[in-house]
Amino acid sequence: LAAERQGLKKGQLRLMAITTASYFAPRLLGEFAKLYPGIEVSLRVTNKEQVLASIANNLDDLYLLGQPPEGMEIESTPIMDNPIIVLAAPDHPLAKEKNISLERLAQEPWLMREKGSGTRNAIERRFAELGITVRPRLELGSNEAIKQAILTGLGISALSRHTLTLNQPGQFAVLDVQGYPILRHWYAIYPAGRQMSVAARAFLDYLLERPEQENT
Ligand code: PGA
């Protein structure tokens, strides 16, 4: 029986996720832990710098990131969609408009994640394609801080749709903007050329075999 085989797998899984992945990683790990009660799981959630340092020093088995790092000896595989959507307060004037241009969007006060954030890079790249530079009105080091600032009417921002998983529908307006959502992915990353542990292999297989409809 598959269930019995799963129960027999033992070991430790050390997982590290970049901050924004913390919105979905615990749920995945919870499901995985139920399937594999013999595997002990730990998850560390941290910023990009520390994730890169940990990869370089081979400290964890598997990493969840929004973009595979360049110039490192790693393998990576996409595991889930990561759409970046534009969010405003529900009563924002742009909430009723369709097909908003990026030029128009750039005139709004922008709330931006810290430099080095994958989300921020994606937003800036999309603007840069049209030669637009946006000066953030406010720089905030977390998705939750940005969401609070949006709701208090300080400005707009774009975040991973996964950051809304715990929110009531309708709490934010998702703006209809040209070039959005930005279609990114979440990646599982692991050191190249090293035998994966049984636990890490089981988790990666679990991620890759989950049904498609759960992937967004
Ligand atoms: P963050 O997200 O760096 O914006 O937290 C990870 C990523 O999307 O690359």
Image (tube, grey):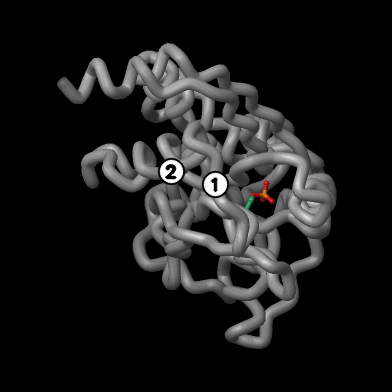
Residue 146, horizontal then vertical, whole percent: 69, 38
Looking at the rendered structure, the secondary structure element under dot 1 is loop
In the rendered view, tell whether residue 74 sits above or below residue 159. below
Residue 150: x percent and y percent? 64, 37
Binning the other alpha carbons within 10 Å of mark 1 as few (below 14), some (14 to 19) or many (20 upward) gives some
Give the quarter of the image for residue 97: bottom left
Q: Is residue 76 left or right of residue 99?
A: right
Which of the numbered marks, if any, corresponds to residue 204? Answer: 2
Earlier along the polypeptide chain: callout 1 or callout 2? 1
Q: Are marks 1 and 2 in contact (CB under 8 Å)?
A: yes
Determine crowd level at label 2: few under 14, some 14-19, many 20+ residues with C-alpha closer than 10 A: some
Residue 46, horizontal then vertical, whole percent: 76, 37
Tell me the SS state at disc 2: helix
116 relative to 61 in the view: left or right: right
Instruction: Describe residue 15's horizontal placement relative to residue 31 as left or right.
Output: right
**Outermost residue toward the left?**
1
Where's residue 83, x and y in %? 44, 54
Up the image or down, 18 lies above or below 180; here it is above
Q: Give the residue at x 43% y 60%.
A: 181
What amino acid is found at the position of numbered circle 1 in the picture? Met
Q: Nearer the viewer, residue 188 or 112?
A: 188
The three-letter code of the residue at mark 2 reads: Leu
Residue 96 appears in the figure: yes
| Marks 1 and 2, how far apart at CA | 10 Å
Read off the residue under disc 1.
196
- At 53% across and 61% down in the image, what residue appears? 76
Indicate left or right for 215 with 137 as reference: left
In the depicted view, which residue is nearer to us: 47 or 192? Answer: 192
